[in-house]
Image (cartoon, rainbow, N blue to C red):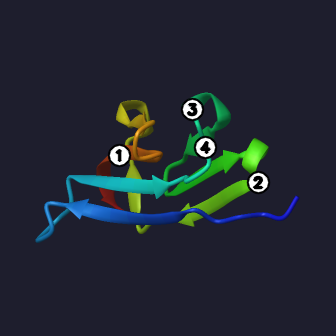
């Protein structure tokens, strides 16, 4: 199966100054449930895999992420995974 990259964006909050959170939005048009996904958030990277549909994305971010307080929510109606990641500091 061919590897596919989902549409995604990573937003810094607040938009100005030192970010407190990063919010990643991953559009997974043919994923039906979060059960199909594997998400791994490291200190400075996000790896998202949806093996059933061939999705794989590995994104490095220029910040240190608080892995213990990261949360993710999959919206079935929009088929979007939203990942909220507190920032510890710029890496």
Residue 68 appearing in the image:
yes
First along the sequence among labels 3 and 1? 3
Which residue is labeled 1 in the image? 85
Q: What's the CA distance linking mark 1 and mark 2?
A: 25 Å
First along the sequence among labels 1 and 2? 2
| Mark 3 residue crowding within 10 angstroms, few (<14) / some (14–19) / many (20+) | some
Residue found 63% across the figure and 61% down from its top: 58
Q: Quadrant of residue 24?
A: bottom left
Residue found 77% across the figure and 42% down from its top: 52
What secondary structure is marked by label 1? Answer: strand
Q: Mark 2 against mark 4, which lies toward the viewer?
A: 4
First along the sequence among labels 2 and 4? 4
Residue 10 is situated, as x and y percent measured from the top left of the image, at 37, 63
Residue 91 appearing in the image:
no
Checking the image for residue 12, the label placed there is none
The answer to whether 63 appears left or right of 8 in the picture is: left
Residue 16 is situated, as x and y percent measured from the top left of the image, at 11, 71
Which residue sits furthest top?
A: 35
First along the sequence among labels 2 and 3? 3
What secondary structure is marked by label 3? Answer: loop
Say which quadrant the N terminus sits in. bottom right
Q: Is residue 2 above or below residue 33?
A: below
Q: Is residue 26 above or below residue 70?
A: below
Q: What's the CA distance linking mark 2 and mark 4?
A: 10 Å
Q: Is residue 5 above or below residue 27?
A: below
Q: Mark 1 against mark 2, which lies toward the viewer?
A: 2
Which residue is labeled 2 in the image? 54
The answer to whether 58 appears left or right of 76 in the picture is: right
Q: What's the CA distance linking mark 4 and mark 1?
A: 22 Å
Residue found 61% across the figure and 43% down from its top: 31
Most foreground residue, 43 or 74: 74
């Amino acid at each position: 199966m061919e590897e596919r990259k989902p549409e995604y964006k990573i937003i810094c909050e607040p938009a100005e100054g030192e970010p407190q959170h990063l919010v990643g939005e991953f559009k997974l048009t043919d994923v039906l449930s979060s059960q199909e996904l594997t998400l791994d958030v490291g200190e400075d990277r996000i790896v998202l895999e949806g093996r059933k549909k061939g999705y794989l994305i590995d994104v490095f971010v220029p910040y240190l992420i608080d892995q213990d307080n990261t949360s993710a929510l999959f919206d079935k109606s929009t088929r979007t995974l939203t990942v909220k990641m507190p920032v510890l500091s710029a890496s």
